[in-house]
Amino acid sequence: MPPKLRLTNTSAAPLTHGVNPRCIQTSGIFKLPAELILEILAYFGDPHRNILYEKSGRYGSLEPKAVERLTVIRRLTMTCWHLRNRLLPVLWKHVEGCNMYPKHRYHGPHMTSQPAGGLYAQCSYLLLNPTIGVYVETLSVDLYFKYAPKDLMSKFIDCLVRLPNLRTLEVFSASHLSPITRGLKRKSAKFPSVRELAISNRTAKFIGCCPNVETVSAPDQLSLGGATVLSSYGKRLEKLKRVVGVAEDSVRLVVQGCPDLQEIGIRACAGIVYGTAEASAKIVEPLRSLKRLAVVELDYDTHLFSSDEMDEIGHEVYKDGRDGYIKEWKRLLIPVLKDSHSQERKFLRWIHSENHWYRDPPNGVTDVVENGELEVFPTTSLIV
């Protein structure tokens, strides 16, 4: 067994060929039985096991269990060459540009400085080590510019340009719009590898940087501001097929800018319950111009399925109102899908989620419009 190397601070040194200076000659890991090493490698090598992929909570904070997994895998990459080669792609496949907050410090500068500092550190590391950047497939960030380094936006854009395999970009929120506008205009950056983009109304400018995007999602609703940006770029996005999270008053604007959409998701459709049928018809009529439309996804307004509300008004009254809501939407939307020229199977999908993070698995029921008839698609249903 070779002598142990004394550990030194190598955090500032760039990595070459994916080798960590701390683990070039370390062999202590091989004291473990070969079967155990193979089991570790098999566990982390399973492509269907999302070990680290877990959305951040409020204010960009990671759950402690996610941070713990990150720490364990990062330490394993420093043990030996075999584990490093296997675990580096796992460690960097999904990158969260934020930090976990210390307990009881959700206030003041800490709400912005720590996520901004975490994102800045991640970008600096990826720029310093381009061999690591090829592993990144998903990047999820919140852009907080107050109490952040002045060149945060510039560093972030430079980092994105150097991620050749980035498929999903999620810019959930931003504290200010002007740094994004100035930064993207100054850099004239393009991210051609991005296929899925999650944005807010303040980060909608990223749409123009992703010419090959196929799905645009707005977790907190795409209102008039964001819809205007999407509409201005829509006809240049030849591969755009799906837009999710459109607010009621933005449907017409999105449809006009993206006439080739195949799927559209509308958020908080409460017009039938709290408004008039005419108001909902105004939402539906623009959809008739989508000749390739195959899927309409309606996200229930959260208060429609509130357990507190159900207890207050009574189960029967609550159920009658809900069923009437669903029945009226079917009456309006099924003819739209039938008239579409799309050759794909057509769905009217009902989605309900307690929060609006689009990564959450959809719970609901899907209605299939096929051969002029309505068929209930077998999924987990909240409509009982």
Image (cartoon, grey):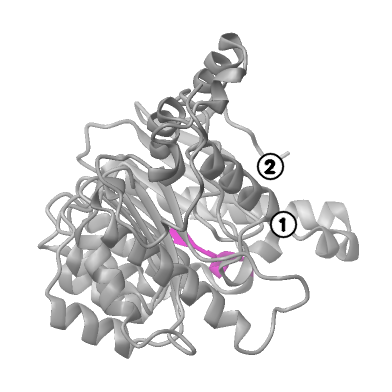
**Amino acid type, label 1:** Phe
Residue at x 28%, y 73% (from the top left corner): 155
Residue 7 horizontal/vertical position (percent): 51, 49
Q: Residues within 10 Å of mark 1 (few under 14, many from 20)?
A: some
Residue 238 horizontal/vertical position (percent): 12, 53
Quadrant assignment, res 188: bottom left
Q: Residues within 10 Å of mark 2 (few under 14, many from 20)?
A: few
Residue at x 50%, y 48% (from the top left corner): 330
**Amino acid type, label 2:** Leu
Label ID, residue 29: none
| Image quarter in which the C terminus is found | top right
Verify whether residue 154 appears in magenta. Answer: no
Residue 65 horizontal/vertical position (percent): 68, 48
Q: Is residue 49 left or right of residue 369?
A: right
Q: Is label 2 in contact with label 1 (beta carbons under 8 Å)?
A: yes
Q: Is residue 181 above or below residue 237?
A: below
Q: Is disc 2 placed on a helix, strand or loop? A: loop
Q: Is residue 85 left or right of residue 55?
A: left
- Seen from the viewer's position, the closer of residues 170 and 42 is 42
Q: Is residue 370 left or right of residue 321?
A: left
Label ID, residue 382: 2
Label ID, residue 305: 1
Residue at x 60%, y 81% (from the top left corner): 111
Q: Is residue 163 above or below residue 88?
A: below
- Seen from the viewer's position, the closer of residues 106 and 235 is 106
Give the extent of the magenta segment.
Answer: 266-273
- Seen from the viewer's position, the closer of residues 65 and 316 is 65
* Extreme residue toward the front, this view: 3
